[in-house]
Amino acid sequence: MELMTRERDGLLQRIARIYGLGFAVVALLCLAGGVPLTSLAVAAVPFLVLVVALWRVGASRSPLWVILAVLGGAGVIVALVAAGDVETVPGAIAAATSIAAGATASVALTLTSSPGRIVLLVLSFAAIAGTIAVFAGSLGTTEVFLFRLIGPVLLGWAVTSFVAVWLSAGLPRVSRRIASIGRAHRAERQASETEAQRRQGARLLHDTVLATLTLLAHSGVGVSEDALREQAAGDAKLLRQLRLGQTPAPASAGVYNLTPVEQTELGTTLESVKSRFGRMGLEVTWHGTGQLLLPSHILDAFLLALAECLENVRRHSGVTQAHVTITEDATSVRAMVTDQGVGFDIADVGEAKLGFAESVVARLRDVGGNARLFSAPGAGTTVVLEVPR
């Protein structure tokens, strides 16, 4: 709230500077357009005081500059009266009106934030109103001249005072709305983080524990006892880490650890994927690039998605061989996983299929990548994985 108050005060000061100097320029043009040089010379000093004070009002909250601006404006009007014959010079009337109703009225924008400044506002208006009354009297005053002078002065000060009060009154509402937006943002962020953690946990369990349980449910068909025992041991270690409150990070396909690296050579981790599925009865043949460098979080997503595709080949294709082709260009790395198995209807892979939708597609999208699936019954399956470099 304090910061918003300072910002509001600074905004009002800058508006007062622009508003006041704008009317001061109008007054100067009116004086230069028809007022004798002698009158200009007399009004020059108070006019300079007015301009300097208005400039400083835009940068300082000191009431001294407000007082100098009012005195400078009143001094210009008094100087015009002292020069004489103002009733015959239309430029003098226009200049006095611009100064009284605009240039000096601009200080009202900065004088509504506290009782002391409101008192200064009233005194400043009284000083300008008295000065303009003296100016009107020098015209051999008539009701028409009084209306032409006093009316605009009252309107100018009323408008600037209203704008300042309106902005000040709106500050608490703005502050409450900003606080409400902040709370909504925090709640949304917390919900997003919770959802991200839930999805990460679901992927983690799907890629490790659930895969092992599926093998056990099928009596480990096609998998050696040693491979099954090794995978179960890794899952047990992971569950112990979770129980102790640690957050495991994937290091390679099917393997999680607590110390992620910044960059890893893709060639070495591809070998770990190949070895893992070789032990489980799926022969993986690699084609294309053998050594690539990727940031660890992208590499983790890429390898885990690749491993999930190979796991689907092992479990669903009905064949014991898969081909993986790795390619790269200046902006991305791609892997194409192909098998000659039974295939399936792509329409059957919906949003609810955790294995592909979450462990492959969503995982790659989280790091700016993508996955495309091609298959048909009896025609095998091809999955194209792509991640940025």
Image: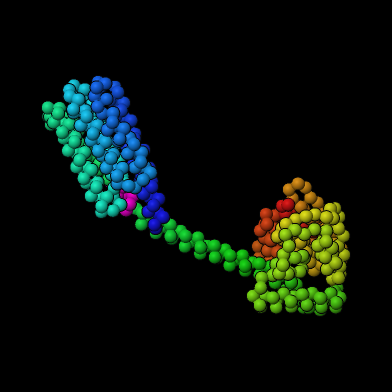
Closer to the camera in the image, 1 or 366 = 1
Q: Residue at x 31, y 26 (%)?
A: 29
Of the 4 image quadrants, the one containing the N terminus is bottom left
Left or right position of 307 against 170: right
Q: Which residue is drawn at 38% across and 44% down?
A: 59
Q: Main SS type for the magenta part?
A: helix
Q: Residue at x 21, y 28 (%)?
A: 80
Left or right position of 100 against 145: right
Closer to the camera in the image, 247 or 357 = 247
Closer to the camera in the image, 166 or 94 = 94
Closer to the camera in the image, 58 or 323 = 58
Q: Residue at x 23, y 34 (%)?
A: 75
Question: How does the figure colour the protein chain or chains?
Answer: rainbow
376 in relation to 42, above or below? below
Q: What stretch is highlighted in magenta?
A: 162-169
The reply to whether residue 118 is in sight is yes
Point out residue 162 in the picture as x, y percentages from the top left corner.
28, 46
The reply to whether residue 308 is in sight is no
341 in relation to 52, above or below? below
Image label count: 0
Quarter of the view holding residue 354: bottom right
Point out residue 69 in the picture as x, y percentages from the top left corner.
28, 39
Q: Does the magenta stretch include residue 305?
A: no
Q: Does the magenta stretch include residue 163?
A: yes
Quarter of the view holding residue 246: bottom right
96 in relation to 329, above or below? above
Point out residue 12 in the picture as x, y percentages from the top left corner.
35, 45
Point out residue 277 in the picture as x, y percentages from the top left corner.
83, 67
Quarter of the view holding residue 219: bottom right
